[in-house]
Image (tube, grey):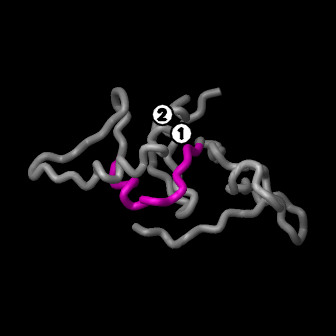
Amino acid sequence: MSTNWDVYCIDCDDGMGLSSWNHAEDAVNSLCHAAALLADLSKLDFGIYSVEFALGRDRSVDLSFFEVHRGHRLRPRSEYGEILGTCAKRIACVTCGHDLYEKCRREPGHPGECAPPVFHARTR
């Protein structure tokens, strides 16, 4: 199945906005693992020259996203809401049992019940 992937901040509920990154979960995962280095690259100053970063042809990456979300939990997220590296079980309302159309974003194999996401204030 054709699936596009984006860099997603679990803490802020914010995505980078990558487009046309089809079947690229491994590349996006690598970006997430290199987040601190990419944040450092975003701060380089070459005077009149800008720093641009791309993977392959036509896959530019906004390095400033990594600086804004420095130290946050970044994960690959599919266009269908799947977040790699999370529990991902669907969550039902504790009161009525209705499906909340949300997936648990805790770590895989976490203790206790699955929980809906809790977001921190955005930093940008």
Q: Marks 1/2: CA distance?
A: 9 Å
**Other-residue count near label 2 (Cα within 10 Å), few / some / many at <14 / 14–19 / ≥20:** some
Q: Are marks 1 and 2 in contact (CB under 8 Å)?
A: yes
Residue drawn where x is 31% and y is 52% of the image: 40
Is residue 68 part of the magenta span, yes or no? yes
* Residue tagged 1: 5
Q: Quadrant of residue 5?
A: top right
Q: Taking 26 as reference, is 16 above or below it? A: below
Depth check: 69 or 62 in front? 69
Q: Secondary structure at mark 2?
A: helix
Q: Position of residue 61 (x, y in %)?
A: 36, 42
Location of the C terminus (image quadrant): bottom left
Q: Residue furthest right?
A: 96
**Residue at horizontal 39%, vertical 54%?**
65
The mark total stands at 2
The quarter holding residue 111 reads bottom right
User: Picture coordinates of residue 38 (x, y %)?
Assistant: 35, 47
Q: Name the residue that disc number 2 marks.
A: 27
Task: Give the label on residue 90, or none.
Answer: none
The three-letter code of the residue at mark 2 reads Ala
Magenta range: 62-77
Q: Nearer the viewer, mark 1 or mark 2?
A: 2
Q: Residue at x 64, y 43 (%)?
A: 80
Of residues 42 and 7, which is closer to you in this image?
42
